[in-house]
Amino acid sequence: GENVEQHPSTLSVQEGDSAVIKCTYSDSASNYFPWYKQELGKGPQLIIDIRSNVGEKKDQRIAVTLNKTAKHFSLHITETQPEDSAVYFCAASKPPGGFKTIFGAGTRLFVKA
Amino acid sequence: SAVISQKPSRDICQRGTSLTIQCQVDSQVTMMFWYRQQPGQSLTLIATANQGSEATYESGFVIDKFPISRPNLTFSTLTVSNMSPEDSSIYLCSVARDTHTDTQYFGPGTRLTVL
């Protein structure tokens, strides 16, 4: 079955620097790749997603890139702020409906002021 | 997106007892799911809550331990039965608007501690 590996498990950056989190997936049929941010005591919040027909997507300080050939995708956060500190999860799913969503293990991001 | 609420937000229970968690969505959705997130871990799908029929359980999860109800398109419950300390986790409800949309939205979670 599908397997999603996520690295690093912990990431510490200085405020204003960029943060990059990488994920690889095993099933080439996967076609939808969401990223979730989970703050302490809260449920995961969808922050950005990308589909397999797109190579890159941006939303303000957040961007996601997808390399279908290599089966990996990455989350890029620029100009990090202390409020970006959270656990980030990548995920992969495939049709139909994509509801066998497989989540990565998570990356705990610390942004130091 | 969808506004999802869960009750209770947290609870502390004695082993051997059962707890029912409620999930309410602000609009009708086709798909509702229940996940478990153990401390410091990722999300594991327990089951898909089907309206009008039995839930579909993932490997390692059974109906006797995690009975699920879904009486309509905006509400579902998950019961954690005969609890043990190993059931201490965050239980999350998620929804997707229809079967053609992969995007899932999560509720705030229920933090369960079993003593």
Image: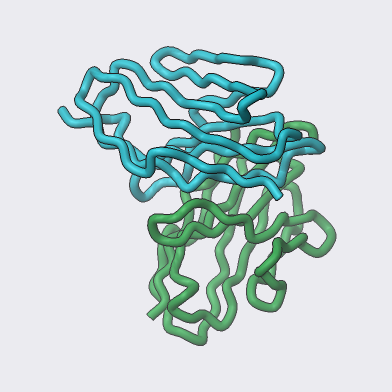
Chain colours: A cyan, B green
With B58 as the anchor, is A4 left or right in this view?
left
Q: Position of residue B56 (x, y in %)?
A: 77, 60
- Residue placed furthest toward the front: A70
Query: If the image is split into quadrants, where does the N terminus of chain B sit?
Result: top right
Q: Position of residue A92 (x, y in %)?
A: 63, 37
Who's the residue at 65% across and 24% down the image? A68
Who's the residue at 55% across and 15% down the image? A57
Query: If the image is split into quadrants, where does the C terminus of chain B sit?
Result: bottom left
- Residue placed furthest toward the left: A113
With B10 as the anchor, is B98 left or right in this view?
right
Who's the residue at 39% across and 26% down the image? A20
- Note whether A54 is above or below B77 in the view shown: above
> Is residue B74 or residue B82 the one in the foreground?
B82
With A62 as the anchor, is A27 left or right in this view?
right
Task: Please identify the quarter of the rendering in which residue A83 is found.
Answer: top left
Q: Position of residue B110 (x, y in %)?
A: 47, 59
> Is residue A105 or residue B81 the one in the foreground?
A105
Who's the residue at 51% across and 21% down the image? A64
Task: Please identify the quarter of the rendering in which residue A56 is found.
Answer: top right
- Residue placed furthest toward the bottom: B16
In this rendering, does residue B60 appear at all?
A: yes
In this rendering, does residue B27 appear at all?
A: no
Q: Position of residue B113 (x, y in %)?
A: 40, 71
With A63 as the anchor, is A92 left or right in this view?
right
Count of numbered tags:
0
